[in-house]
Image: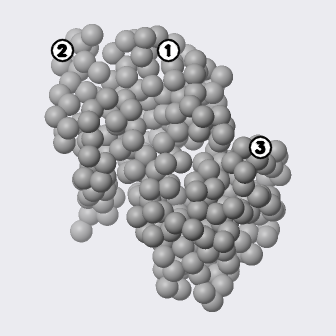
C-alpha cells in the first residue's frame, strides 16, 4: 500500500509521551538511507498510555514496526499477540513488529546495553548497581546478568520491588532492592547503571566515592548529565545513552525491515548521525 502522493510504502515510528525530543527518527532515517530502503518512513507520535489501544487499532498494513519509549514499554504488553522470552523476563517491550495483522513484542534495549558495555571492555564485574526501578531498570538487570551474579537496585518507590525481584529470579540474579535514600552507597559498585529520568540523579554527583568504576548513563540529551560529568572528572569510564540508543536502533531496523545489516558499520554511521544532531561542533 502506498500513501497517496507520498511514495511511502512502509511505515515505522517511535511512540511515547513526551516524544518530541526523541533521536530515533534521526537514527532510523539515516539507516534507511544507508541501506537504500526507498519508500520507508519513520516518524514520532506523542501517544499517552491511555491512547495506545486506539492508536494501534488505527494502523493499516503499510506499518512494519514501532519503537516504544516511556510510558509505553509495559503498557503495550496486554495489546500484543506474542512476545519474545526477553520481554517475558523484563516485563517490557520497546519494539513492536507488525505483520499479518499480528503484533509481536521484542526488547532491543537488553542486547543494546550488553553490546555497549562490551565495546567499553565491561565483560565481568563483581556487582552492579542500578539507579531507578522502572522498565529500563528491569532491562538493565537483564544486561547486568550477562556481566555479574549480583545486583542492587535503588528505587524511588517501593511499589516496584516485586516486579524487580520477579525479573531477577528469572535471570538467576541475586538482587537487593534498596531505598533511593541509600543510592549514594550504590556508587561504589564497579558498574553503575542510571536509568532514572532527567534530573533525578543529579544530586548524586556530589556524593561520588574517591574511586569510581564504570557509569552507564542511559540519558543522552542534554549531555553530559551532572552525574556523568562528575564521574568523568573522577577518572571513571562513562558509557552514554547514545551508545544504547544506537545499538538498540540498529537491532530494531533489522527486525522491522528484514534488511541484511553489518552491525558494527551501521552502528558507527548512526552514532555519527546522532552526534551531529545532538552535539554539533
The location of residue 279, given as percent across then percent down, is: 31, 63
Q: Give the side of residue 129 with respect to residue 123, left or right.
A: right
* Secondary structure state at the residue bearing disc 3: helix
Front tag of 3 and 2:
3
Residues 68 and 262: in front is 262
Relative to 31, residue 58 above or below: above
Mark 1–mark 2 distance (CA, rounded to whole Å) = 27 Å
The location of residue 83, given as percent across then percent down, is: 58, 27
Q: Give the side of residue 161 with respect to residue 280, left or right.
A: right
Q: Residues within 10 Å of mark 3 (few under 14, many from 20)?
A: some
Mark 3 highlights which residue? 166
Mark 1–mark 3 distance (CA, rounded to whole Å) = 27 Å
Relative to 74, residue 177 above or below: below
Q: Residue at x 50, y 54 (%)?
A: 113
Relative to 69, residue 139 above or below: below
State whether residue 27 appears in this view.
yes
Q: Earlier in the sequence, mark 3 or mark 2?
A: 2
Residue 102: mark in rendering: 1
Residue 5: mark in rendering: 2
The location of residue 164, given as percent across then percent down, is: 75, 48
* Secondary structure state at the residue bearing disc 2: loop
Amino acid at each position: 500500500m502506498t500513501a497517496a502522493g507520498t511514495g511511502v510504502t512502509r511505515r515505522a515510528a517511535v511512540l511515547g509521551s513526551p516524544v518530541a525530543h526523541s533521536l530515533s527518527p534521526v537514527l532510523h532515517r539515516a539507516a534507511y538511507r544507508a541501506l537504500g530502503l526507498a519508500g520507508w518512513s519513520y516518524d514520532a507520535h506523542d501517544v499517552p498510555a491511555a491512547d495506545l489501544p486506539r492508536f494501534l487499532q488505527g494502523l493499516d498494513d503499510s506499518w512494519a514496526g514501532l519503537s516504544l519509549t516511556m510510558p509505553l514499554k509495559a503498557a503495550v504488553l496486554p495489546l500484543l499477540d506474542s512476545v519474545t522470552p526477553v520481554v517475558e523476563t523484563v516485563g517490557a517491550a520497546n519494539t513492536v513488529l507488525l505483520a499479518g495483522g499480528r503484533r509481536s513484542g521484542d526488547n532491543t534495549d537488553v542486547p543494546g546495553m550488553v553490546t555497549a558495555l562490551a565495546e567499553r571492555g565491561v565483560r565481568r564485574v563483581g556487582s552492579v548497581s542500578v539507579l531507578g526501578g522502572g522498565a529500563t531498570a528491569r532491562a538493565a538487570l537483564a544486561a547486568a546478568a550477562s556481566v555479574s551474579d549480583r545486583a542492587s537496585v535503588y528505587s524511588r518507590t517501593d511499589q516496584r520491588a516485586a516486579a524487580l525481584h520477579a525479573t531477577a529470579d528469572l535471570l538467576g540474579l541475586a538482587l537487593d532492592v534498596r531505598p533511593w535514600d541509600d543510592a549514594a552507597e550504590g556508587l561504589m559498585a564497579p558498574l553503575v547503571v542510571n536509568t532514572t529520568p532527567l534530573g533525578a540523579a543529579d544530586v548524586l554527583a556530589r556524593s561520588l566515592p574517591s574511586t569510581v568504576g564504570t557509569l552507564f548513563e542511559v540519558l543522552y540529551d542534554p549531555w553530559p548529565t551532572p552525574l556523568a560529568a562528575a564521574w568523568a572528572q573522577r577518572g571513571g569510564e562513562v558509557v552514554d545513552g547514545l551508545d544504547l540508543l544506537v545499538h538498540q536502533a540498529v537491532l530494531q531496523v533489522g527486525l522491522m525491515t528484514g534488511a541484511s545489516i553489518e552491525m558494527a558499520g551501521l552502528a558507527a554511521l548512526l552514532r555519527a548521525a546522532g552526534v551531529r544532531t545532538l552535539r554539533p561542533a
